[in-house]
Amino acid sequence: MSRDSDWRLLLPASVRTLPADLAAVVVLAVATTVAATVPGVRETPLRVLLGLPYVLFIPGYALVAALFPEARESPEDGTGSDEADGREGIDGIERVALSFGLSIAIVPLIGLVLNFTPWGIRLVPILVSVTGVTVVLTAIAVRRRAQLAESERFHVPYEAWLTGVRQELFHPDSRADAGLNVILVVSILLAVGSVGYAVAVPAQGEAFTELYLLTEDESGELVADDYPTEFTQGETRSMIVGIGNHEHETVQYTLVSQLQRVEVQNNTTIVRERDELNRYSPTVAANTTWQTRDSVTPTMSGERLRLTYLLYKDSAPPTPTADNSYREVHLWINVTTEQ
């Protein structure tokens, strides 16, 4: 008995008889679940390295394995063609192509179904659903293969592949083959290294900051609509002002709100009077959002006054203006005097 057979005897019978390719499907499902949910692991590139093949290939492979448990017989094996004995197996290339195609169909379909459930399209529901479908299909594939004779079952020819690769790499037929083998190995290593680097060190993209205003609707939801425009001098009304930090680093901001009386001359807006209403100095971590309820109490009256929010990195200058701000948003409001 070989050493490979010896260590397999240590496993339970149900695991020992599980086809190697279907066992790999289950192992990858478990590994992906761990990589996507366990703190400390889900922040690493391992999540992407396992997640991509899991989503793009594994569900389809499990379905193909369930639909086609039999091996495809070749005419050279001396037992006749597929049509002769009624077997409908598919070859390896067809199996791989179908696995990719069906995975691309299965995963969006699962997402569509989840969209109409209370759980929605989120990481955990998608992960549980895809894993559940994959495990069920794998169990069906195991059962269907077990119902076939040993010689009729599909199996991945790992040993034949390894023998062929070993023969080609270490015992080439000519120097030209040896040189091509070296080029192939170097190309594979460069490709794997490039993908690994791209995953481990992703491009940061554009750095920017969002500054926005929100209000509450009748149900208490925050919406970017129905802003207050009619004020009474001395009366306080409020709205939500938010900062979204996409600068890829923690930033200390200064936010200044002003009520301005402006005049437009020759398509140029001139500020005739400005009163500072509030000032905030939040520290916002990278890829997070800061919000606060800003209380607006107009200090001047008139029509077409400009309620302006000016955002700065670090501190604000002595005279904050729209021209020297990093970000600016404003509302046009009317303020009447108390009767």
Image (cartoon, grey):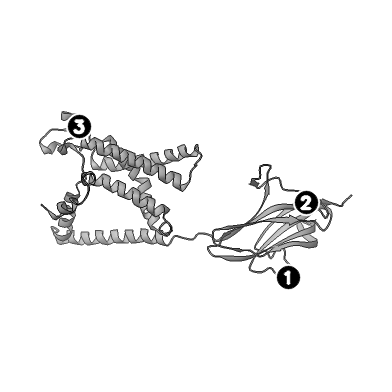
In the image, 164 versus 11, the foreground residue is: 11
Q: Quadrant of residue 292?
A: bottom right
Look at label 3 and name its amino acid. Arg
Please name the residue shown 13% across and 59% down the image.
171
In the image, 43 versus 321, the foreground residue is: 43
The correct choice, above or below, for 205 with respect to 111 in the image is below
Q: Residues within 10 Å of mark 2 (few under 14, many from 20)?
A: some
In the image, 66 versus 224, the foreground residue is: 66
- Horizontally, residue 288 falls left or right of residue 220, namely left
- Horizontally, residue 118 falls left or right of residue 133, namely right
- Residue 268 position within the rendered picture, expressed as x and y whole percent measured from the top left: 76, 58
Q: Earlier in the sequence, mark 1 or mark 3?
A: 3
Look at label 2 and name its amino acid. Ile
- Horizontally, residue 74 falls left or right of residue 239, namely left
Q: Quadrant of residue 286?
A: bottom right
Separation of residues labelled 2 and 1 (CA atoms): 25 Å
Q: Looking at the image, do the residues carrying marks 1 and 3 touch, with CB atoms under 8 Å apart?
A: no
- Residue 307 position within the rendered picture, expressed as x and y whole percent measured from the top left: 75, 56
Q: Earlier in the sequence, mark 3 or mark 2?
A: 3
Whether residue 73 appears in this view of the structure is: no
Please name the residue shown 82% across and 55% down the image.
234
Q: Residues within 10 Å of mark 3 (few under 14, many from 20)?
A: some
Residue identifier under label 3: 87
Separation of residues labelled 1 and 3 (CA atoms): 84 Å
| Residue 318, disc | 1
Look at label 1 and name its amino acid. Pro
- Horizontally, residue 94 falls left or right of residue 148, namely right
SS at mark 3?
A: loop
Q: Residue furthest right?
A: 339
Please name the residue shown 36% across and 58% down the image.
195
SS at mark 1?
A: loop
Residue identifier under label 2: 333
